Image (cartoon, grey):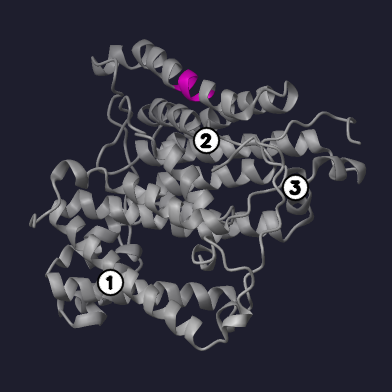
């Protein structure tokens, strides 16, 4: 058993938390429907 | 995460409405926060890591969450109008430079304005590329991030090196004076010193939020409800969000989609630039330093996605990242280890709650149990 987390790991804790939290939370997310889509004026169906 | 894939059907299966989902939103947030404080104070009690709930840690966390919060708000504005903003990082870098350049000459308020303007310029570029010329949003965002790094290196060699004798650093910028909300802050500090089990932990966490404030912190926290109000409670916001949900339908109803998208992306860049200004005016490191942002724009984007493209959620996400960063900065590896301990307690609590919830209900109420059914409660 290591008594404490290595310093190198500790400084990356926020990034690791980001990864973990996004992996857990990504199941229930609903982004805006047309996000990242091309849109040109007057070309709708 | 965000994809440019064909439009996925956005109708996630609605979770079964239980007692939990019938509670109003603020009550749910309050319960989650109370559970979090309880677990943290339990961890502090069991491991003796008093830094986990000290007011100093909370203050560090607030300073660290502020740039992430601004970036996340910027992401919210752009993505609600349907433009993916990977370029937040680049706009933030532009903001750090603009804030340092204006700040060392004319003081902290000029730094705020400088960061805002430079970030908004980056946002304008992103808007021209993605809205007018229909460039892929990811490509444009990456290009803006690279451009931000290059331009700031060039400009700081040009403007900062003659003054600071270092092309990677600006002269020192004058920061804001900090203030505390009295007399509550003193009273909470007293309570923290007394070392009572849960009360002192809560007092430490809250006291850190009320002391060592700068005007920029206040602006950041005020902008969360302001964004909520503007985007969800006004006609302007409804139109802006309709551009992100279905621009063709919005156009058919007379919404000026181009104008709204432009406005949203420029505001987004301005907010990211404010995040850069928050880094430049950080009391620990006053001034521009190359590579200062350290991917905080991306973390802000992640916080916004974690918060389900909502202001309250992104505040929670940035608070989480800011807190973890503050703990590791102030107390180092042992405290992060204690945080792992807290995480395992949290996992046990969640498991117990989950079992209790499932146990009191007939199995037939579960529709379509599949491999994802366990995670769908999240």
Q: Is residue B164 left or right of residue B357?
A: left
Q: Are marks 3 and 1 in contact (CB under 8 Å)?
A: no
Extreme-bottom residue of the structure = B360
Residue B223 position in % (x across, y down)? 54, 54
Residue neighbourhood size for the residue with mark 1, other residues' Cα within 10 Å, grouped as few (<14), some (14–19), many (≥20): some
Q: Is residue B145 magenta?
A: yes
- Of B207 and A10, nearer the camera is A10
Identify the element where label 2 is drawn.
Answer: helix
Closer to the camera in the image, B22 or B212: B22
Circles 3 and 1 on the same chain: yes
Compared with B217, B157 (above or below) is above
The residue at 66%/67% (across/down) is B14
**Mark 1 in CB contact with mark 2 (< 8 angstroms):** no
Q: Is residue B222 visible?
A: no
User: Which residue appears at 18% of the width and 58% of the height?
Assistant: B337
Q: Is residue B259 visible?
A: yes
Badge 3 marks a residue whose secondary structure is helix
Q: Which residue is mark 3?
A: B245
Query: Where does the image place residue B261, in percent across and percent down from the top left?
Result: 72, 37
- Magenta-highlighted residues: B144-148
Q: Which residue is the site of mark 2? A: B116
Q: Position of residue B254 (x, y in %)?
A: 91, 43
**Gap between marks 2 and 3, in whole Å?**
27 Å
Q: Are marks 1 and 2 on the same chain?
A: yes
- Residue B345's disc is 1
Secondary structure type for disc 1: helix
Quadrant of the rendering where the N terminus of chain B is positioned? top right
Q: CA distance from mark 1 to mark 2?
A: 42 Å
B135 vs B202: above or below: above
Dot 2 alpha-carbon crowd within 10 angstroms: few under 14, some 14 to 19, many 20 or more? many
Relative depth, front residue between A41 and B213? A41
Q: Which of pointers 1 and 2 lies earlier in the amino acid sequence?
A: 2
């Amino acid at each position: 058993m290591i008594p404490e987390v290595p310093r190198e790991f500790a400084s990356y804790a926020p990034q690791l938390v980001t990864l973990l939290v996004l992996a857990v939370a990504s199941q229930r997310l609903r982004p805006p429907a047309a996000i990242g889509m091309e849109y040109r004026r007057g070309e709708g169906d | 995460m965000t994809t440019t894939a064909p439009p996925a059907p956005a109708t996630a299966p609605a979770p079964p409405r239980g007692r939990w989902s019938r509670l109003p939103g603020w009550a749910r947030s309050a319960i989650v926060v109370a559970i979090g404080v309880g677990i943290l104070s339990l961890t502090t009690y069991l491991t003796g890591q008093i830094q986990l709930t000290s007011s100093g840690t909370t203050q560090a966390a607030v300073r660290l969450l502020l740039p992430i919060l601004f970036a996340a708000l910027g992401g919210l504005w752009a993505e609600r109008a349907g433009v993916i903003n990977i370029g937040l990082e680049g706009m933030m870098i532009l903001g750090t430079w603009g804030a340092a350049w204006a700040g060392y000459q004319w003081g902290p308020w000029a730094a705020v304005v400088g960061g805002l303007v430079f970030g908004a310029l980056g946002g304008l570029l992103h808007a021209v590329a993605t809205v007018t010329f229909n460039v892929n949003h990811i490509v444009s965002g990456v290009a803006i991030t690279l451009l931000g790094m290059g331009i700031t290196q060039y400009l700081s060699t040009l403007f900062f090196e003659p003054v600071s004798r270092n092309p990677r650093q600006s002269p020192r910028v004058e920061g804001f004076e900090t203030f505390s909300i009295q007399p509550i802050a003193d009273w909470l500090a007293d309570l923290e010193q007394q070392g009572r089990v849960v009360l002192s932990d809560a007092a430490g966490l809250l006291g850190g939020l009320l002391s060592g404030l700068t005007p920029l912190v206040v602006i950041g926290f005020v902008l969360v409800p302001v964004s909520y109000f503007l985007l969800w409670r006004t006609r302007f916001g409804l139109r802006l969000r309709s551009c992100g949900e279905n621009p063709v339908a919005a156009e058919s109803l007379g919404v000026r989609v181009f104008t709204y998208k432009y406005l949203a992306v420029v505001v987004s860049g301005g907010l990211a630039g404010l995040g850069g200004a928050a880094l430049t005016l950080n009391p620990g490191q006053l001034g521009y330093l190359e590579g200062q942002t350290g991917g905080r724009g991306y973390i802000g984007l992640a916080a916004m996605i974690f918060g389900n493209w909502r202001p309250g959620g992104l505040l929670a996400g940035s608070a989480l990242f800011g807190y973890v960063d503050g703990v590791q900065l102030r107390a180092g590896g042992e405290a992060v280890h204690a945080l792992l301990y807290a995480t395992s307690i949290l996992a046990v609590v969640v498991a117990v709650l989950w079992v209790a919830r499932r146990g009191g209900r007939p199995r037939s109420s579960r529709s379509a149990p599949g491999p994802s059914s366990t995670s769908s409660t999240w």
